Image (cartoon, rainbow, N blue to C red):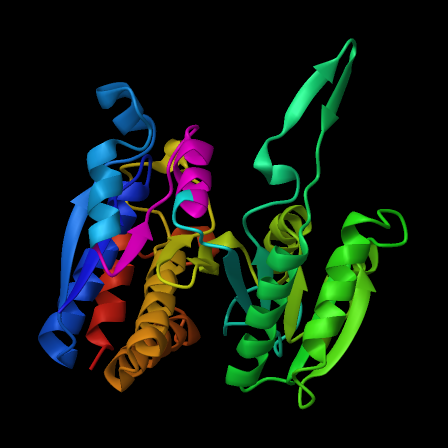
Amino acid sequence: MYKISLITGDGIGPELSESVIQVLNAVNDKLGVKVQVTKLEAGDAALKKTGKALPDETLDEIKKSDACLKAPVGESAADVIVVLRRLLDLYANIRPAKSYPNMPALKENIDMVIVRENTEDLYTGMEFDLGETSVALRTISKSASERIAKYAFMTAEQRNGKKKVTCVHKSNVMKKTDGLFSRSCQEIAKNYPKISFDQMYVDACAMNLIRQPEYFDVIVTTNLFGDILSDEASQVVGGLGMAPAANIGDKFALFEPVHGAAFDIAGKQVANPSSFILSTKMMFEWLGMKNNDKSCYDVAKKIEDAVYGIVREGIKTKDIGGNKSTSEFTQSVISRIT
């Protein structure tokens, strides 16, 4: 029995959470992998209710679980996800970008993963004022750079892709910080002779994601660049509605849709649950790897095959050109999980 904590979030978060709960119920009933879900509060509603965007009891329950699913939250997002990343040392942000049928991807053969360092860079929030000038400190360490590079190469080994890692940085300008990141990736690359390794400046990478997205397999990069490039990659394959994400550490992981809380469509049953459902697929992959549990890998494949199958048949929500409601789309997915 896997204990899963579920932050139901704000805006469309509760609707998407209900979709994921139904998918997990189907996994329980049809596939024999047992999960127990505990719904938790965090985000804007929790802040208004308790005075904390991430209440202590929510954090305690997350720590007791085997993995966490997080629906989108509102304006207090940084006080939830950034805090969880630091407290639980979720140093690897994993963002797949893959072409799906009947989706407006630039090309049909895109299949990449962006592996983003998740704990340092400008996102540490070390900012201060010097008179009328504001300063932000950018922190890049050898240890964090090496461990994210190692995760990227391990990811490339496990994928059926091109067996290639591309290190993305801007060391021609930021010679100290990005220079260190670049050198650290080069050193780790020596331990993986079967994986091809190259490097690219971030501006060139941003261009090539549009010009030649099929070139990439695994991209490893720093926190800020990874945040920007992964959103770009999501649009390249058709939009944020199909984009899952994982925040992974050595002992724990959190999985979430990439998009925001979309308060303007909350409660209307028009939100696309694919990103959150595919994040659940990533969760089962991670549980399978962590626990050497083949049945979890099987569940992950069946969830992705179900989503792939229904969009191939043209079953889509309104945001991606279809006419199905959130619950109707979810039921279509569940009907194909066998």
Residue at image position (24%, 33%) is: 56
Residue at image position (74%, 78%) is: 197
Say which quarter of the image contains residue 11.
Answer: top left
Whether residue 214 can be seen here: no
Whether residue 118 can be seen here: yes
Residue 332: % across, % down: 25, 68
Residue 28: % across, % down: 12, 71
Residue 80: % across, % down: 39, 37
Inspect the magenta stretch and tell me whether residue 73 lies in it. yes
Inspect the magenta stretch and tell me whether residue 62 lies in it. no
Say which quarter of the image contains residue 281.
Answer: bottom left
Of the pair 244 and 40, the residue shown nearer to us: 40
Of all residues, the one furthest to the left in this rendering is 29
Residue at image position (19%, 57%) is: 21
Quadrant including the C terminus? bottom left
Of the pair 331 and 169, the residue shown nearer to us: 169
Of the pair 283 and 336, the residue shown nearer to us: 283
In the rendered view, does 256 fall on the left or right side of 7? right
Say which quarter of the image contains residue 117.
Answer: bottom right
Residue at image position (23%, 22%) is: 50
Quadrant including the N terminus? bottom left
Of all residues, the one furthest to the right in this rendering is 172
Of all residues, the one furthest to the front in this rendering is 143
Point out the stretch of residues depicted in magenta.
65-86
- Relative to 326, say whether 73 is above or below: above
- Relative to 25, say whether 216 is above or below: below
In the rendered view, does 160 fall on the left or right side of 59? right
Residue 167: % across, % down: 73, 66
Of the pair 294 and 107, the residue shown nearer to us: 294
Of all residues, the one furthest to the top in this rendering is 131
